[in-house]
Image: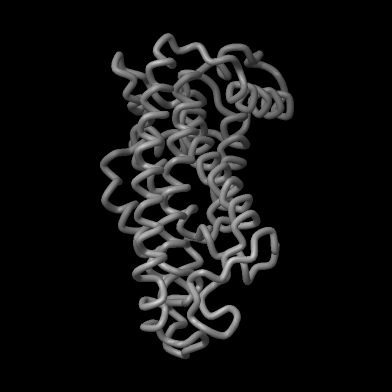
Amino acid sequence: MPVTTTIAPHASYPAQLLALSWRSLAQLVRMPSHSRRANAARKLARHSLWLSMAGAAVVIVLMVAFDQTEIQLMPARGTAWLWPIRILTDLGKDEYVLSVLAAVLVVIALVAAGLHGTRRALLLGLGTRLQYLFLSVALSVFIAEILKFIIGRGRPFVGGKANPFNFVPFQGSEAYFSLPSAHAVTAFALAFAVSALWPRLRAVMFTYAIVILLTRLVLLAHHPSDVVAGALVGMIGAMAVRYWFAARRLGFAIRADGTIVPLSGPLGGRLKRVARGPSAP
């Protein structure tokens, strides 16, 4: 990786850490260089358009035909036996997911600053992939928060009755932050991003995302159309960040037809050997 080739090997540990951190961030905003990025951009635009159109249609149908019926079937808020679901749903809370990813990135930077050569390159390769996960979730959640404020949809039973058309745009309170679901955004952005990097984990990650989605319904935190909209925002956000990384040759390659594929990453055994290596110069 570029961040490993321009740092003096005998610099002090703080200097190494500062240089690595700076270059790891700088690589994210450098000019795109991939010769096939235009093909990938066209494919991203096409897929995002079709996904948005299909998703919007599903959201409208759910809002008109199913939202009211579904929330009336759910147990009342505060039901005692729902406590395991309240714990489970926090696995999709954006603050927790982003905090964990940020903490791991900090640890990788601290360890990589004390390594050299192949060990550092392997660890920084993992760090780049974790940057992709972090930014996929962060961008998607940021967009979702703007949409929540603009749309101003009331959560289930806000106002005292099951009214799926309770909208107060620009209201700005938590009670009217129902559409889209931030938990669904987080879970599906993370599921898509992990699957984009490590396709073998696709089934596990989307199972996780669906479970988080269902917990939001059972807890009466959202209508069905809210979580579908959240899933849509999360996946399109992660797709956009994937293109940004691929255009800069970070973690992904672009095929001739514009398809973005993951670059081969560090293997588990090699990472274990890195972990056992020295963590100081």
Which residue: 64% across, 15% down? 7
Is residue 147 visible to us here? Answer: yes
Task: Point out residue 141 in the picture as x, y percentages from the top left corner.
Answer: 56, 50
Give the side of residue 99 with respect to residue 215, left or right. Answer: right
Task: Point out residue 169 in the picture as x, y percentages from the top left corner.
Answer: 65, 60
Task: Point out residue 179 in the picture as x, y percentages from the top left corner.
Answer: 53, 60
Give the side of residue 10 with respect to residue 141, left or right. Answer: right
- In the rendered view of the protein, which quadrant contains the C terminus? top right
The residue at the far top in this view is 35
Where is residue 207, by image quadrant? Answer: bottom left
In the figure, 39 relative to 177: above or below?
above
Which residue: 56% across, 71% down? 166
Is residue 122 visible to us here? Answer: no
Give the side of residue 83 with respect to residue 269, left or right. Answer: right
Residue nearest the viewer, comparing 205 with 77:
77
Task: Point out residue 39 in the picture as x, y percentages from the top left corner.
Answer: 38, 17
Residue nearest the viewer, comparing 262 with 12:
262
Which residue: 44% across, 41% down? 236
Please tell me how many numbered marks the rendered image carries. Answer: 0
In the figure, 248 relative to 196: above or below?
above
Q: How is the image coloured?
A: one colour
Residue nearest the viewer, comparing 206 with 69:
69
Where is residue 102, by image quadrant? Answer: top right
Which residue: 59% across, 66% down? 167
